[in-house]
Structure formats: C-alpha cells, structure tokens
Image: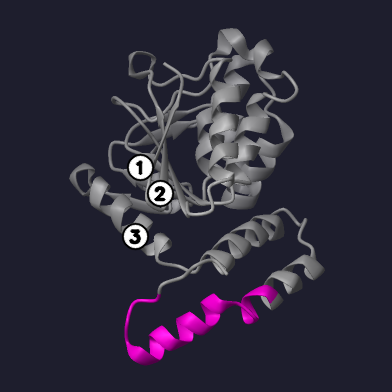
Amino acid sequence: MTPELQVQNHVATISLRRPEVANRLAPEDLPVLIAHVQAVNQMDDVRVLVIRSEGKYFCSGYDISEVKNSQTQGSSFGEMVDAIEQCRAVTIAVIHGGVYGGATDLALACDFRIGATPAEMFMPAARLGLHFYQAGLERYVSRLGLDTAKRLFLTCERLDSAEMKSCGFLTHLVEPQALPGAVSALTDTLGAMAPLPLFGMKKHLNLIARGLHDGEAIARDVFQTVHSDDLKEGGAAWREKRKPVFKGR
C-alpha cells in the first residue's frame, strides 16, 4: 500500500505501509509522498509532521530493481526527500527499527529523528554500484560532517543505534517502550510554539546549513514576528504565568 496521510489537531502523520518488504519504497510511492507533503504545507493549523512506519523496520530505502524509475523529473527520489526537508511544518522521523539506503536520507531530511535501541542503519550505494544524488550527499555532510559522511558512503559500514546517536544521525534515542511517549512529548512541545518563528527559524536554519540563506529574508521574518499578535500574546502569557494561545498572526 502507498503511504497514508492522517491529520489530528496540530499533527500530521505519514505512515509507510509495506512491512512485508521492510517498507521499501516503490516508484508509485514518490509522487504520493510529495503530494502528502504539499497537502500538509497548505494546512495552516498543522505544526508538526511525523513520519513513521509499520512492522519491524523503518524503511529499507528504494527498490534497487526500480532505480532507473526513481529519476523522473517532478517525482524523483531526490525531489521527494527535498520536499520533506522543505516541509513548512517541523518534521519528526520515528525510527523504531532498521533504516537503509535512500531511507537514511529521508530521515536526515527530517528536523528530528527519534530512534529506539533496535534501530540500525547503513548506506550500501557503493556496494550496489550506485552514485548517490547531490542533495543527499549535501545532507549527509551538513548534518553529520564530512568524515562521517565518507565513513558511511565509502565503506558501507553498518551503525547500531548508539553509534547513530553519537554521530548525530539520531537526535533522540530511547528504549522501545519509551518511544511513543518520546514522540508525543516532542510533538506537544513543538505544537505549543508560536507558528511564525517556529516555521521561519526551521526554514532558515536549513538554508544556513547549506550556505543558501538570505539575510534580507531572515530580517523580514524577524520584523514580522516583532510586530505580530503572537509576540504580544507570548509576553502576556509569560507575565500572567499561563499557557499562551498562538494564532499564527
């Protein structure tokens, strides 16, 4: 089955639903995932997008037998991952098990990666004869550093969950039974933030990491928040020792 999108309150969830093949992605999944992200981008009330999967594995990447069909302009694998990175909402990958190949880049495109101790990862592109695409190489370097990117791409080394956390692949690491609570706590934290700075800083931090940021655009977003109703509400709530009610205005 193709990935499914569900929305509840401030949180959207995309679920990968092919556990019988370790949630391997097929050509028809790519435009569906892009469309789901585009739909989330149009939902003003959604502040968090969670990506999770069914079964033992998070995702085993793209079907290598279909790799020639992953380059179609408008629905390529790289464009799908870029769409996730550029999602307006803050993104969380829930990595409860193995994550392999292109799925490691999908996870790196997310703002947070919460892993459970059974998780493991490896990037077998060189072993399979495949040169990875530019944006994926850039994500590995910007998020994990050049030496770690070389280690993972050039040796196809397999990392366990502790190593994934220590190299920065995972932002959080918990025991399996604590995973739902950790995801819920993070989504609650993010959902309580003021939308304008939450979305703006997420976008600009990603651009800064790539060396593509625009100082004038950052200044415009700062100005917008300085003159926003939400900043007034945040200050009032702080003084009154209550939870703020943000409207994104």
Which quadrant holds residue 125? top right
Residue type at mark 2 is Val
Mark 3–mark 1 Cα distance, whole angstroms, equals 24 Å
Between 133 and 28, which is closer to the camera in this rendering? 28
Mark 2–mark 3 Cα distance, whole angstroms, equals 9 Å
The first of marks 3 and 1 along the sequence is: 1
The first of marks 2 and 1 along the sequence is: 2
Mark 2–mark 1 Cα distance, whole angstroms, equals 26 Å
For image coordinates 35% across by 44% down, the residue present is: 115
For image coordinates 40% across by 49% down, the residue present is: 11
Badge 1 is on which residue?
161
Q: Residues within 10 Å of mark 3 (few under 14, many from 20)?
A: some
Q: Is residue 24 magenta?
A: no
Residue type at mark 1 is Ser
For image coordinates 60% across by 31% down, the residue present is: 34
Badge 2 is on which residue?
11
Q: Position of residue 102 (x, y in %)?
A: 56, 28
Q: Which residues are drawn in magenta?
A: 224-244
Q: What kind of colouring is applied to the model shown?
A: one colour
Q: Residues within 10 Å of mark 2 (few under 14, many from 20)?
A: many
Between 6 and 175, which is closer to the camera in this rendering? 6
Which quadrant holds residue 82? top right
Q: Is residue 228 magenta?
A: yes
Dots 2, 1 in contact, CB < 8 A: no
